[in-house]
Amino acid sequence: MSNETMVTLQGRVGGDVVLRQAGGSAVANFRVACTPRRRTKDGEWVDGPTQWWSVTAWRALAEHCASSLHRGDAVVVHGKVDMRTYVNKAGVETLDVQVEAATVGHDLTRGTSSFTRYQPPAAQPVAEQVVAA
């Protein structure tokens, strides 16, 4: 068992999912906005400050995120936290916090969704592979 820090985010997709190839694997990047709501002493709901999280998904999960998620969708993301510091263009050291997603799904407390099971392409029988060559 590793000592990775895991988090679960509940929020909304903040923009389009960007799908690309990296080292022969699909990788998707998107942002999730998490805005906490609190009840005041008067019983009214108020929004807290929005936290923005960068999310990365790999391989099949990346492709599924790209085809399933849209700006504004309510999502739940579970994955490991990756924190890195870097010096930005202005010469300021900046902390970058990202989540490498293990699972992603629509938040069904906020709406409904339709699930389609992934069907990998059928493998060709060996005889067909030989004929095709």
Image (spheres, rainbow, N blue to C red):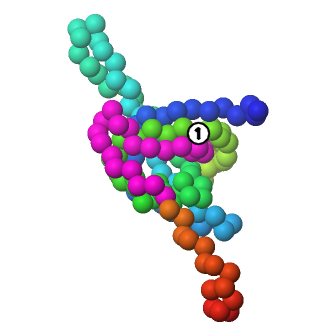
Q: In the depicted view, which residue is nearer to us: 37 or 49?
A: 37
Q: Is residue 27 found left or right of 116 in the rendered image?
A: right
Q: Secondary structure at mark 1?
A: strand
The residue to which callout 1 is attached is 79
Report the residue at 54% width, 43% height from top.
Answer: 103
Q: Position of residue 26 (x, y in %)?
A: 58, 63
Left or right: 131 as drawn, with respect to 107: right
Would you place residue 62 above or below residue 20 in this image? Answer: above
Q: Who is closer to the viewer here, 15 or 65? A: 65
Residue range (magenta): 96-118
Quadrant where the C terminus lies? bottom right
Q: Residue 33: in sight, yes or no?
A: no
Classify 4 as above or below 126: above
Q: Amino acid at mark 1?
A: Gly
Q: Is residue 110 magenta?
A: yes
Residue 103 visible in the picture: yes
Residue lying at the far top of the rendered structure: 41
Report the front residue among 129 and 27: 129
Screen quadrant of the N terminus: top right
**Picture coordinates of residue 80 (x, y %)?**
63, 38
Q: Residues within 10 Å of mark 1 (few under 14, many from 20)?
A: many
Image spot of residue 38 (x, y percent): 34, 18
